[in-house]
Image (tube, helix red, strand yellow):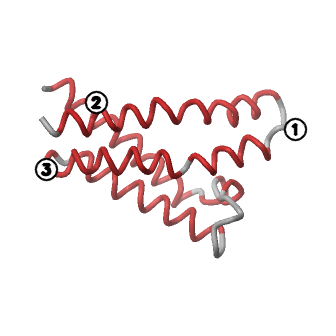
Amino acid sequence: MTERRGEALALAGLLAAAGVTHLVKPGLYDPIVPRALPGPARFWTYASGVAELAVAAAVAHPRTRRRGGLAAAALFVAVLPANVRMAGDWRHRSPARRAVAYGRLPAQAPLIWWAARVARAAGR
């Protein structure tokens, strides 16, 4: 039980940290917002930061952990197009930056799995 709680709180911490960085350093994220989204990129950067903070809170609280885990999995799926855009845009950058951009793509799968695992554990 404690291990699962720790896993949920770690996920909540990751989401909270991402949410805070979206709000404090939006310039890092604006360039990877998919062009297909309507309106300014900054809106989507802030909206995703707020969503990450809300989902982090839901995952952190035992009563909302199941729904929060499902929302986290959906959020990780939703940001995949931004990671695809980043990989394409960064294909001519330094090897280190390309590694970061390309590494984000396969990293989404374990994040989705982790969020689903937290949701499943909370549903028991």
Determine crowd level at label 1: few under 14, some 14-19, many 20+ residues with C-alpha closer than 10 A: few
State whether residue 86 is above or below residue 24: above
Label 3's element?
helix
Q: Residue at x 30, y 32 (%)?
A: 117
N-terminal of the pair, mark 1 or mark 3, is: 3
Cα separation between marks 3 and 2: 16 Å
Instruction: State left or right for residue 107 relative to residue 59.
Output: right
Instruction: State left or right for residue 76 relative to residue 95.
Output: left
Cα separation between marks 2 and 1: 37 Å
Determine crowd level at label 2: few under 14, some 14-19, many 20+ residues with C-alpha closer than 10 A: some
N-terminal of the pair, mark 3 or mark 2, is: 2
Instruction: State left or right for residue 49 relative to residue 98.
Output: left
State whether residue 46 is above or below residue 14: below
How many dots with numbers? 3
Relative image position of residue 37 (x, y in whole percent) = 63, 67
Relative image position of residue 1 (x, y in whole percent) = 13, 26
Determine crowd level at label 3: few under 14, some 14-19, many 20+ residues with C-alpha closer than 10 A: few
Circle 2 sits on which residue?
7
Q: Which mark is residue 92?
A: 1
Q: Residue at x 57, y 62 (%)?
A: 45
Label 2's element?
helix
State whether residue 95 is above or below residue 21: above
N-terminal of the pair, mark 2 or mark 1, is: 2
Amino acid under disc 2: Glu
Badge 3 vs badge 2, beta-carbon distance below 8 Å: no
Circle 3 sits on which residue?
63
Q: Residue at x 34, y 58 (%)?
A: 54
Q: Residue furthest top?
A: 3
